[in-house]
Image (tube, rainbow, N blue to C red):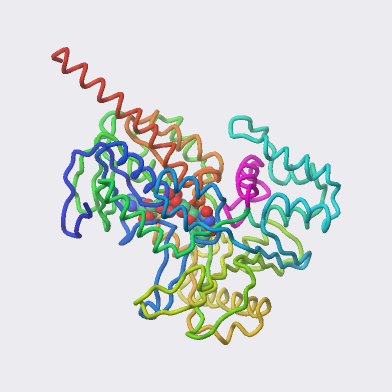
Amino acid sequence: MLYKRKERPEGPYDVVVIGSGLAGMTAAKKLGKNGRRVLLLESHNKLGGFATWFRRKQGEHIFDVSLHGFPIGMKKTCRKYWTKEIADSIKQVNKVRFINPQYDLESDFTKEDFTEKLVGHFDVPRETVEAFFNHLANMNFYDDDGMTNGELFRKYFGDRNDITRFLLEPIVYANGSTLEDPAISYGIVFSNFMSKGVYIYRGGTDKLIGLMKEDLLETGVDIKLHAFVEEIVVEGDVTRGVRLKDGTFIEAKSVVSNANLHNTIFKMVGKEKWAPDYVEAARKVRLNTSSCQVFMGLAPGESIPDMGELIFYSEDKEFSTDALLSPKVGSQTFSLYYPNTRPAVEGDGRGDRYAVVSSSNARYEDWKDLSEAEYKERKEYNIERALSCLDKVIPGTRKKINYVDASTPLTVEKYTHHKGGASFGTKFEGLPISMGMHKEIKGLFHAGSVGIIMSGWLGAANYGVIQSHEVDNYLDKIDTQKTTENQLGL
Ligand SMILES: Cc1cc2nc3c(=O)[nH]c(=O)nc-3n(C[C@H](O)[C@H](O)[C@H](O)COP(=O)(O)OP(=O)(O)OC[C@H]3O[C@@H](n4cnc5c(N)ncnc54)[C@H](O)[C@@H]3O)c2cc1C
């Protein structure tokens, strides 16, 4: 059931899931399907977490926040754990364009095409390209050789900054990887994307999340929106349930937190409840970077030519992590939404509409201490950068735009409660902390963007599945224990 605003859910539940990001929702769906009594709590007024959208000008414009591209694996995950209808709307992005001072190229983002570009355009021997792709294909989480992305590129391509840019820039936007991050996090994600190109959900994020919500309710999962969890209640080393901001206690045998890893450990549970070495290791987990976006809506009747759906645009002479994160916004990705990306819905009065979203990576620290005037000025700077650069890519577009707004790392933090406005959870070291949480406190699990690999739409959804298996095992174990105790009359 979908609880109304004033209704209070009544435990005990088998599982309470805190947060409805793709990991939280997929875990809730899987556990509900397995017959568990599940409650999904979300602090926001809609499901989806980062997989979100918003309307402006009385619904005339709809903007997608994180629908830019994901690997083909999302289709399989949606078919297996959600519905065929959802999976069938996942379609390939037809063209990806790269425009920067080092090259102007178009690709379908497949391994074959990247190989041809590396050999034909960048003049790399074919054997080197094949050796590089083989290296990536053989990478796995359990055999990390400690190499960084920078070292990996140097090994195969020497100091070719243009090649580093070609290979890494799209992944920076996909999961926040930098040259200094472990090569394993890049390798796994890049190999995923390279299998068959980049995909998006045709129909818009609102349609996808609407279908997921319907499916959750049909599966029997209870949902409560506007429900901010303040505390995960732990007695000794066992999870007992959660307490909402209004004081309501909801009893549960297990809890899955889809909230930020740091918030889960330090805010919702509290450092005194964990073993000192776990707290120490968790404290050292670095957050990933944040994002800025500019949302541009075209006026009714206006259009843009087919330029593909993703344009990696940069005016920075060379690729570097610093330049990519700089408030100067030398680099940004344009996502182009045509009427076939987001078809007109009968009765909503919008008709065929076009929109463009610019995304750039950013540091929370560059935004957090600004005065109101400085914040406004920097937002306006970002808007101007996006409009002027877009006009260079597609001349004449600027004057067709009748709505524009910008988001910053503080917007990300406000809507998702992610510490530091982190767009992709934590750096690599967050993964063992997240996966090991239930070994520290019985019945408490974490499923959400961590360790670069488990972030992005596909990574998050798959992590929800992985953690739902752990929850199932735990519930089976405690149920068996209870039955035995009852049989023995204990
Ligand atoms: C600008 C941007 C663009 C992106 N583009 C892409 C892309 O093109 N492709 C891609 O694959 N990925 C993209 N991503 C990343 C992707 O969207 C995320 O990695 C993924 O959606 C995260 O899912 P999650 O399950 O970790 O949870 P999140 O989406 O982080 O959701 C967590 C949820 O928990 C809720 N919550 C937190 N604390 C509490 C609490 N105490 N009580 C109740 N609820 C709580 C939050 O409100 C939120 O709804 C992008 C991200 C950003 C920011």
Left or right of residue 246: residue 95:
right
How far from the left and from the top, in percent, is residue 247? Answer: 19, 49
323 vs 11: above or below: below
Left or right of residue 373: residue 327:
right
Does residue 222 appear anywhere in the picture? yes
Asked if the stretch drawn in magenta spans residue 185, the answer is yes
Q: Residue 489 or 315: which is nearer the viewer?
A: 489
Q: Residue at x 49, y 66 (%)?
A: 408
Q: Taken as a whole, is the magenta stretch helix, strand or loop?
A: helix
Does residue 419 appear anywhere in the picture? no
Q: Residue 336 or 389: which is nearer the viewer?
A: 336
Quarter of the image with the C terminus is: top left
- The image quadrant that residue 101 belongs to is bottom right
Tell me which image quadrant ligand 1 sits in. bottom left
Asked if the stretch drawn in magenta spans residue 62, the answer is no
Q: Residue at x 67, y 76 (%)?
A: 393
How far from the left and from the top, in percent, is residue 36? Answer: 27, 37
268 vs 107: above or below: above
Residues in magenta, as a range: 172-196
Q: Residue 70 or 250: which is nearer the viewer?
A: 70
436 vs 338: above or below: above
